[in-house]
Amino acid sequence: MESARGFAFELGHRMEGALGRTGVIRTPHGEIATPAFTPVGTKATVKAVLPETMRDLGAQVILANAYHLYLQPGADIVEAAGGVAAFMGWGGPTITDSGGFQVLSLGVGFKKILAMETSTVRSDDVIAPGKDRLAHVDDDGVTFKSHLDGSMHRFSPEISMQVQHQLGADIIFAFDECTTLLNTREYQELSVERTRLWAERCIAEHERLTSQRVGRPYQALFGVVQGAQYEDLRRRAARGLAGLPFDGFGIGGALEKDQLGTIVRWVAEELPEDRPRHLLGIGEPTDVFVAVENGADTFDCVAPSRNARNGTVYHPERKFHLTNGRYRRDFGPIDDTCDCYTCTHHTRAYLHHLFKAKEMLASTLATIHNERYIVRLLDRIRHSIVDDTFTDLRDEVLGRAR
């Protein structure tokens, strides 16, 4: 897909017998070679790591969260700073999500259970014990309570677009309703249609705001495909969005991991081949191989940095926890095949000490390794598609993991 507005997607190699492919996303702030991992900088920062360090470890793009930046420091402040990339001193391509997941799920209020129920489930039944419902959805939008101070706010498709235009990311997402697998089939049907109608409103507001932003970089708008684990709903949702003038698409919603590849394939088969596909909230190595093979181009996930802050690091054979006593006198690197700063300069014993001593550097060094591990894995996957060795790489990496 070519665009005169500073955004484009160029297809590269296609995987024989599968939907995987390489490509290049061109944005006003730089190119993204795909498949690619998108580290998450929720509040305009990848926790514990400098922006220039993220660039050094090979990150091509960073995703920030519209909901969190809207609440703090405020989208107007980010806009006054020149947009989220300038605000955080990143300089490269950026993405913001719509805030839909956060205002509708708000992890502190909603259950995290991913179990399909066939019986009728009332809306209050998806609230975790001891928590309050913090968001209420209607056909116009969502009213929600701030997790910071309890103040009430309202997001609609129009407001989400206004906030994301102020944040100024290169790629933004249409406002969607994110359901859980506890919602009924009937509700999922209503939600898919609501998301489609919201998508149309997002496009209209996006075009209005773009026309007013003369002289500022174009922001690409991606629609989000929902539909839970129902094939007909996923395909219907994808077809409904495919006919709209989106620059690309996101694949969202709760799903069980053993259905990931199947759901991505359903969606990819319905979407235009000449536009990029972003899989929201996925980043574990096993999931990435499955998603790439079935047609996803980019991914974002908080897991690498969150795991790191908890002392869990990635290794070709397994994830392990650095606070385990066995690493107290282990003077080898986390991974002797890794080229990150942490692995080439520090030992497991040192990181074990830092975590036990509750030193801030522990999170920094562990996060550098985990982010580099996933970024490098996607680099290897991208090259394997070009070299037609994807299956060999997948079998090698997943065969070593346990």
Image (cartoon, rainbow, N blue to C red):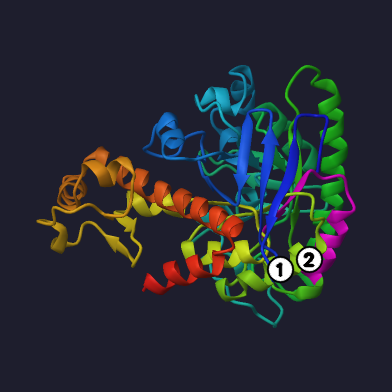
The residue sitting at 70% across, 39% down in the picture is 172
Q: Would residue 362 be visible to someone looking at this image?
A: no
Quadrant location of the C terminus in the rendered image: bottom left
Distance from disc 1 to disc 2, alpha carbons, whole Å, reads 6 Å
State the image quarter where residue 24 is shown.
top right
Label 1: state its secondary structure: helix
Q: Is residue 149 above or below residue 132?
A: above
Residue 335: x %, y % from top left: 28, 55
Label 2: state its secondary structure: helix
What's the residue type where badge 2 is placed?
A: Glu
Q: For mark 1, does the 10 Å Cα neighbourhood hold few (<14), some (14 to 19), or many (20 or more) residues? A: many
Q: Which residue is mark 1?
A: 265
Indicate left or right for 267 with 341 as reference.
right
Asked if residue 271 lies in the magenta stretch, the reply is no
Contact between marks 1 and 2 (CB within 8 A): the answer is yes
State the image quarter where residue 67 is shown.
top right
Asked if residue 239 lies in the magenta stretch, the reply is yes
Q: Is residue 266 above or below residue 374?
A: below
Question: What range is drawn magenta here?
Answer: 233-252
In front of the other: 366 or 306: 366
Residue 107: x %, y % from top left: 53, 55
The residue sitting at 54% across, 31% down in the picture is 72
In front of the other: 298 or 360: 298
Q: Residue 269: which numbered mark, if any?
A: 2
Q: Would residue 325 be visible to someone looking at this image?
A: yes
Q: For mark 2, does the 10 Å Cα neighbourhood hold few (<14), some (14 to 19), or many (20 or more) residues? A: some
